[in-house]
Image (cartoon, rainbow, N blue to C red):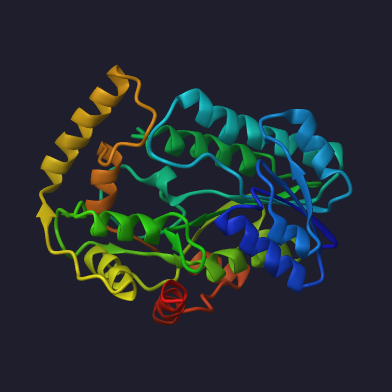
Amino acid sequence: MKKALVTGGGGFLGSNIIRMLLNKGITVRSLQRSDSPDLKKLGVEIIRGDISDRNTVINAAEGCDVIFHVAAKAGVWGDYDDYYQCNVTGTKNIIDACKAHNIQKLIYTSSPSIVFAGEDEENINESTPYAEHFLTAYQKTKALAEQMVLAANNETLATVALRPHLIWGLGDPHLAPRIIERAKAGRLRLVGKQNNLVDSTYIDNAALAHLLAAEALGTNTNCAGKAYFISNDEPMPMKELINRILAVANLPPVTKTIPTQLAYTIGMIMEFVYRIFKLKEEPIMTRFIAKQLSCAHWYDLTAAKNDLGYQAKVTIDEGMERLKASLNK
């Protein structure tokens, strides 16, 4: 790798991938919707634009030899067309850019949610099929995009899809802040059983997996055209993960619970009301959230270890210490 294009470089995962690339002496260009003065100071070329615009993407990819496609519309609520434009049309544009500029490597950030069918996922591997029915537009469009990326793998373009689960850590704008905010507001509940194991991924490990995948595409044809689950490989009960995050924020553990079926019913009602009144903000509960919080989600990482040489470098214990230090500054 000499010059990399990172889409969504201003985001949590994208910015950490960029910093790792820079540390390896690789020139980086970032395609993102907003500005990033901190990345500019590091020497990153920032191109502001939308990945759903084909010309913008093709122009941004010129001169690059690898693309890390991280940008996506995430969340559990919103118009399907908005998700489709970003996640599917945007990914098609990325593939077209690879073809237009003869770029040989494409690393795509996918999601484990694309195989989630509302049931426990215990030590599953990549042979698990895509879900037949999706509860969110995010799931469906990410599944379509991943299939598109893997199908694009050929003799001139090597592609790989990574599925990191529950990314958290320094600079986390999503998981930890949301848990902390809801706990402070007294709105945090444990859903369903208390022993459902879940995997999570410290941010450094998620970023590292992307660089390992790019390196493997150049030396190991075994990984081309395949998807890989990524995590810290330290599954723990959902209750413990949530309470450890609360502990580093000096907050008491959450003890209040709500039955899974009740949470699912509340989510169904809230979705109906939000849809009828065309409310844009995300409901505090949806059917997907109820299922996600009450089911097990942990993965067999054998394929990532064998094909990519992946191994988590930062343990959950160490990650929590880093998170605590940042919150207490």
Quarter assignment of residue 273: top left
The residue lying toward the viewer, choosing from 118 and 153, is: 118
Q: Check the image and name the residue furthest to the top.
A: 276
Q: Position of residue 45 (x, y in %)?
A: 81, 53
Quarter assignment of residue 277: top left
For the question of whether residue 268 can be seen, the reply is yes
Instruction: Please name the residue shown 37% across and 33% down the image.
Output: 281
* In this view, 137 is above or below 214: above
Q: Is residue 261 left or right of residue 238?
A: left
* In this view, 315 is above or below 293: below
Instruction: Please name the residue shown 56% across and 42% down the image.
Output: 72
Count of number-bearing discs: 0
Instruction: Please name the residue shown 72% across and 59% down the image.
Output: 39
Quarter assignment of residue 299: bottom left
Q: Is residue 299 left or right of residue 58?
A: left
Q: Is residue 272 left or right of residue 81?
A: left
Q: Is residue 303 left or right of residue 151?
A: left
The residue lying toward the viewer, choosing from 76 and 226, is: 76
Instruction: Please name the residue shown 27% across and 38% down the image.
Output: 286
Q: Check the image and name the residue furthest to the front.
A: 329
For the question of whether residue 220 can be seen, the reply is no
Q: Position of residue 21 (x, y in %)?
A: 73, 66
